[in-house]
Image (cartoon, rainbow, N blue to C red):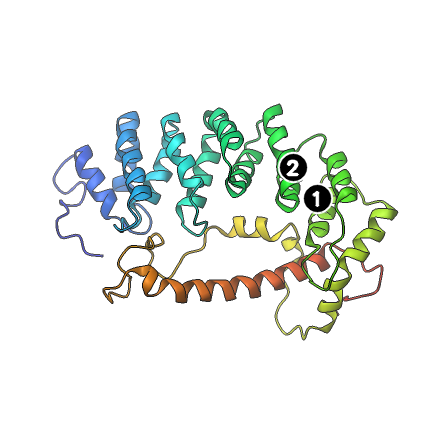
Amino acid sequence: MDHPDHPAAPGATGTPSLQELLHHLRGSEGELPAAIRSPLLAAGATVVPALITLVERALADEQTDLGWAPLHAVELLGALGDARAVPVLLRCLDHEDELDLLVPQAATTLHRLGALALDRCLVAYTATPRDAFRDRLAGVMSRWGLHDERISAALLDTLQRTPELGANDLVEYGEARALAVLAQTFDALPIREGDNTLANHVFIELRGAIEDVGGHVTAAQQQKFTQADAPRRRFVAQMPWDVDAPGASAGRSTRMARAARGPHHSRTAGNRKLGRNAPCWCRSGKKYKKCHLPLEQGERDRERDTKSMGRVLWTGEHRGDDADGLGRLP
């Protein structure tokens, strides 16, 4: 991306002004150069309103491609540790498009802010009608290392609404009551009937979480697990496994694995994922949503389904148990 109107590089004309640094920030792609990042951080609280405004503009105007600038701004807000950033970070986290890179970047920054974001995150968790936003908030709060009864209540609520995510959040958080509530949830959930191989994946997650906190499934729970997991194991036994299996360390969950790898990058030449109404990256003159977006979504969906199926099926194997003799791979 060309930016012919940018001022000279920082340092070339003496000490740059704050406005010059912000101008360079808006034109930077990839990793933010230290010559821009360091003086912006040195500016401290004075630069926070400008960074917030930049992120707010990205949220309000998807027709303008701001490149990496909003992502850099969110990261800088976390490094500056200013509580004024929390409201706009929550708006990023609540973005409807979970593939927008602002979503995981906001989660990382909120995690970095920790206690500064606690009260507003809890208020947002209670107020939002969107379960996806609640799940993201619970994931952030579970990693803070802050033991607060209000966080515990939110994580227990997440377990009831979204057991797969809630189980891992409780393990991450270190909830003292985790073992009991995980076992109770395991016992209470019904087995979904049918041959859908992933319909009962929740029991793999719950069993893994129980073991992660130092517990063991009972004989009755083992029997239930075997029954719930049978369709998946039959499917595994029939598969021509000609691809490398993930290592044993991949067993936590598909969600945790995604988080460890970082956000998905679209094919937009390194820029933040384009807004739906932005001009397409291929320069066809069409809007992104009318040009390459449907193609990329189809490609992402196929890739996600293939990788998710493989990870989930293998994850079940790495969870252990071959009590029924089904599906053990050589």
For this view, does 237 lie left or right of residue 69? Answer: right
Q: Amino acid at mark 2?
A: Leu
Image check: 222 left or right of 304?
right
Observer-nearest of 155 and 39: 155
Residue 232: x %, y % from top left? 72, 63
| Quadrant where the image shows the N terminus | bottom left
Q: Element under label 2? A: helix
Q: Which residue, given by chain and number where applicable, does mark 1 sit on?
A: 209
In the picture shown, does residue 241 fall above or below 77?
A: below
Residue 109 in percent (x, y) is at 43, 37
Q: CA distance from mark 1 to mark 2?
A: 8 Å
Amino acid marked by disc 1: Ala
Query: Which residue shows up at 19% across the image and 56% down it?
Result: 2
Question: Reading the chain from its start, which is encountered first: label 1 or label 2?
Answer: 2
> For this rendering, which residue is in front, 276 or 22?
276
Q: Which residue is mark 2?
A: 170
| Residue 78, quarter of the rendered image | top left
Residue 280 location, quadrant: bottom left
Q: Is residue 51 left or right of residue 209?
A: left
Question: Is the residue 239 above or below the residue 205 in the image?
Answer: below
Residue 33 in the image: state x and y as whole percent: 29, 45
Other residues around mark 2 within 10 Å, as few (<14) / some (14–19) / many (≥20): many
Residue at the (80%, 66%) spot, across then down: 326
Q: Secondary structure beneath disc 1?
A: helix
Residue 90 seen from this side:
yes
**Residue pushed farthest right?**
219
> In which quarter of the view is residue 154 placed?
top right
Whether residue 172 is visible to the viewer of this picture, yes or no, is: no
Label 1, residues with CA under 10 Å away: few <14, some 14-19, many ≥20: many
The answer to whether marks 1 and 2 mark residues whose Cβ atoms lie closer than 8 Å is yes
